[in-house]
Amino acid sequence: MGMMKVQRQAPESISSSAAPVSPVEINRSCCLPVTLLFAASIGWLLVAGVLGLISAIKLHSAAFLSQAAWLTYGRVFPAYLNVLLYGFAVQAALGIALWVLARLSRAELKGSLAATFAGLFWNIGVFFGVAGILAGDSTGYLWLEMPRYATPLLFFSYAVIGLSAAITFHSRRERQLYVSQWYLVAALFWFPWIYSTAQLALVYFPARGVVQAVVAGWFAHNIFTVWLSSIALAALFYFLPKILNRPLHSHELGMFGFWALAFFGCWGGLQLGGPTPSWLGSVSVAAGVMTLIPVLAVAINWRRTLLTGDRKLAPNPVLSFFKFGAVCYVVASLIAIAGLVQAPVELSAQHKDMSETIQLTFAFLSRLMGGISEVAEFTHYASGVAFLFLYGFFAFVALGSIYYIVPKLTLCDWPSAPLLRLHFWSGAAGVVLLVAPLVLGGVRQGAALNNADLPFLETVRGTIPFLGTSTLGLLLLFVGNVSLAVNLARLLARCRCLECCGLAKDPGTGRAPVTVAANL
Amino acid sequence: MNQGPLIFLGVFLAMALSWYGMVVVPHAQLGRLQEANVPPANARYPTLKSGLAQQGREVYRANGCNYCHTQQVRAEAKYDVVLANAGTNKTELVKVILDLNAGLSAEAASKLADAAPAPLARGLRETAAADLARKFEELKKIGAPEAKVDVVVRYSGPDIQRGWGRRHSVAQDYLYERPVMLGNVRVGPDLANIGARQPDAATQLLHLYNPQISAKGSTMPPYPFLFETRQVIAKPSPDALKLPGEFGPPAGYEVVPKPEARALVAYLLSLQTDASLFESPLPLPPKKSGAEAATNQPPAAAEATSQSAAVPAFAHK
C-alpha cells in the first residue's frame, strides 16, 4: 500500500523535475479540508433525508404538516432538493476532487487551510440558502432556489476551493495525465461558469421572459449531466482500477468518452413543445441522444476493466458501492434518453412512396421510442430519473469514495463493518424502491394525463400507490445514511485526527507508514 | 507529454459553444421581445400585471406552487383549408378542386363546391396549408375569381380537451413574468389560463383555504396560513369565507383571507392566455351556418369552457 497503483499508458514519461510527494504527505495535506467536506456533506445528507421524507409523505397525504407556511410542500421540497444538491452532492464532489487530484498529481494539496475555511463558509451559505427557501425567499428556478443573499457565499467558497485544486494541479509532480484528471479539471472549471451565468441571467439581471426558463434548464442539465457526472466518473475511473489493482482497459476509449461528454453533454436540458423556441428543444434532444455515445464508451471501458484479469476477488463492500453506482449511471442515462426521444417520423403523405419495409421499420421505431416520451412529460418520470442519477449513481460513487478516502486521511479504520454492509444493502434497496415506482408510476400518470376523458383528479389518485412505495425507498435510504453517519461519528471520535492533520505535536506517528484501511 | 493546455482549451471550447448556443443566442432571439398588438381591437399583449397580482406572483413563488402546477399549455396546431365562398362559376371551381386534389371524383368535388363553406383539406401543417391556399389562388384566377379559401387553425391534444387553454402557450405569454415559472410536473392541473377558467375569486379562496371543499380527494395541501381565523366582533366581516359546515370555524369565529391570499388570487385571476397571437392564433369565433366545419373547435373543449363558467365548483377536468 502507499504507492500509486493507477496504471498509465506511458510510464516512462514521468517528469524528473521534482520527486513525487509520498501518499502519506498528500493525505496529511488533504486531511483537514477533505474530512470537513465529507463530514458536513453526510450531515446534510441526513437533513435531506428528513426533508425528503416530509415532502414525499405530503404528496400522498395532503394535510400532513400543513399548518405552518415553512412546512408547506412548495417550500420543503425545494429545500430538500437544494440540501441534496449543494449540501451533500456538490460538497462531497469537491472533497473527492481535491483528494483525487492531489493524489494523481503526486503533489500536496496547496492552500489546505484556505480550502478548509472555504468549506466552512460553503456550509454557512447552504444553511442560509435553505433557511431562505423555507422562509419563502426562493428564487423560483428549479435547482437554483437559494436566495441572492446566500449564493455569493457559495460562489466565493467554491472559488477558493477551486483555486486550491487548480494550484495543486499546476504544481503536479507527475506530468502524465490520467482520465480522472481531465474530468476533474473540466468540472472544476465549468462550475463557476454555469453557476455565475445562471445567477447573473436569472437573479441579478433577469433576462426577459422565457429566456429565464432556457437558462435555468441549461444550468440544471449541466450541473447534473456534466458537472456531477464528471466528478463521479473521475472517481470511478480512479477507484475501479485501483481497488481491482489492474490497469484501465483503454486509455483511448476513456479519452473518447470524455470528449464526447464534453461536447454533447452541455447542450441538453430543454424539451420540445414548450413555449421556448423549438430549435432549442430539437438541439437539446439531439444532444441528449448523442450522450448515449459517452455513456456506452465509459460502460464498455469499466466492463472490460472489471472482467479482465483474475476473477477471484475477495468481496469488497466499497467496490460494491462503485459497481452499483456505475450500473445506475448507465441505467439512468438510458431512461433519461428514452424519455427524450419523440416519435421520429410521422408517416405522412410524403412517405407513402417508400418501400413497405422502411415504413414498417419507422412505425416500429416510432412506437418503441415515441411511446415513452409521449407519456413521460410533466410526470414523476423525470424525478425518477433525477433521483436515480443523484442517489443511485452520484451518491453511491461519492459514498464509496468517502468509505475509501476517510480511513486514509484519519489513519483509522471504519469501526463497524456490519454498518457498512447495512448501508450498502439498504441504500441499494432504497434506490430501487424509490426510483422504480416513480418511473413506472410516471408512465402510468402520463398515459392518464393524455386521456382527456379521465378526470384530472383520477390521474393524481392513480399515482398515490406508487408515491407511497417510493416513500418507503426514501426511508431505506435514510436508514443507510444514518448508519454511515454513526460509523463516521465513531471513527472521528477515536481517530488521531489532530495528529494526522499536523495540528498536534508528534508528527512522528503521522509519518509512520499507513497500514490501516488497506482492505475493507 | 504535457496535455494540460490542450485539455483546458478543449474544455473551454466545449462549454463556450454550449454557452453561446444555449444562453447567448436565445437571449439575442428573445431578449428584446416586445408587447404585440393583438386582434380584434389591436390591444397590447401582454400588459403589466396589476400591483396586487404582482404581489400574488411573489406568494406563488414563495410557496412553490410551481412544484405541482405547470403554466404551459401544449397543443398541436393543425390547419384546415376551407372553401369559404364558392363564387358563381361552379364548373370552373370543380376543375380547380380536381386540380388540387387528383384523388377526388368529379362528383365529390361538385358536392364540395355546393357545400361551401366546406373544408378542402384538413389537418395540414402550417406550411402545407399555406401552399395549398396559394395554389388555389393561382388556379382560380382564370375561371373562378370570386371563389375564396380561408386557412383555419384548430388545436388538438389533451390539454385543449381538458379545457386548460384554447391554444399553445408561446414565449410572448411570459414577457413580463419574473420569475418565469413554467413548471415541469402536473401533480395539479395547468394554471396558464386559470383566470379565464375559474374567474370567481370566492371559489379560488375557498379552494386555497381547503381544497377538499371543492375537490374532494385532491392531494393539494390546504393553506390555512394564508387566512386568519378570528372572533366575530359585532357583525361578521363581509370578506369572511362562506365555508360549508364541516370545514367552518367554531361558532362565533370567522375565516378571513390575509392580504397574501388576496394577492395570490389576484395573480391567479390574471393568468389568462386568451389573446390571439401571430405565432399562436386563436380559431375564428364560430359562425351561424357551417360553423362546425369552419372552426372545428373540439366539442370537448367548448363543453369544458362553458362548464367551468357555469359551475362554480373547481372544474377538475
Image (cartoon, coloured by chain):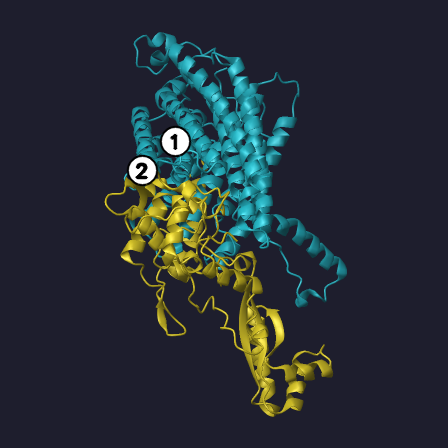
Vertical order, A87 against A482 (above or below) = below
Amino acid type, mark 2: Ala
Residue B109 to residue B78: above or below:
below
Kind of element beneath mark 1: helix
* Residue A287 image point, x, y percent: 53, 49
Residue A254 locus on image (x, y percent): 55, 36
The residue depicted at 43 percent of the width and 33 percent of the height is A84
Marks 1, 2: nearer the viewer? 2
Residue at x-position 65% and y-position 26%: A308
Mark 1 vs mark 2, CA separation in Å: 18 Å
Question: Residue under mark 1: which chain is it in?
Answer: A
* Residue B315 in picture, x, y percent from top left: 49, 54
A411 vs A252: above or below: above
Q: Quadrant of residue B52?
A: bottom left
Side of A403 where A505 appears, left or right: left
Judging by the rendered image, the residue that carries numbered circle 1 is A87
Determine crowd level at label 2: few under 14, some 14-19, many 20+ residues with C-alpha closer than 10 A: some
As helix, strand or loop, the secondary structure at mark 2 comes to: helix
Camera-side residue of B249 and A479? B249
Per the rendering, the colour in which chain A appears is cyan
- Mark 2 or mark 1, which is nearer the start of the sequence? 1
Q: Are marks 1 and 2 on the same chain?
A: yes
Q: Is residue A33 above or below residue B149?
A: above
Q: Residue furthest left?
A: B234
The residue nearer to you, when weighing B210 against B275, is B210
The answer to whether residue A245 is seen in the rendering is no
Res. A135 mark: 2
What amino acid type is highlighted by mark number 1?
A: Gly
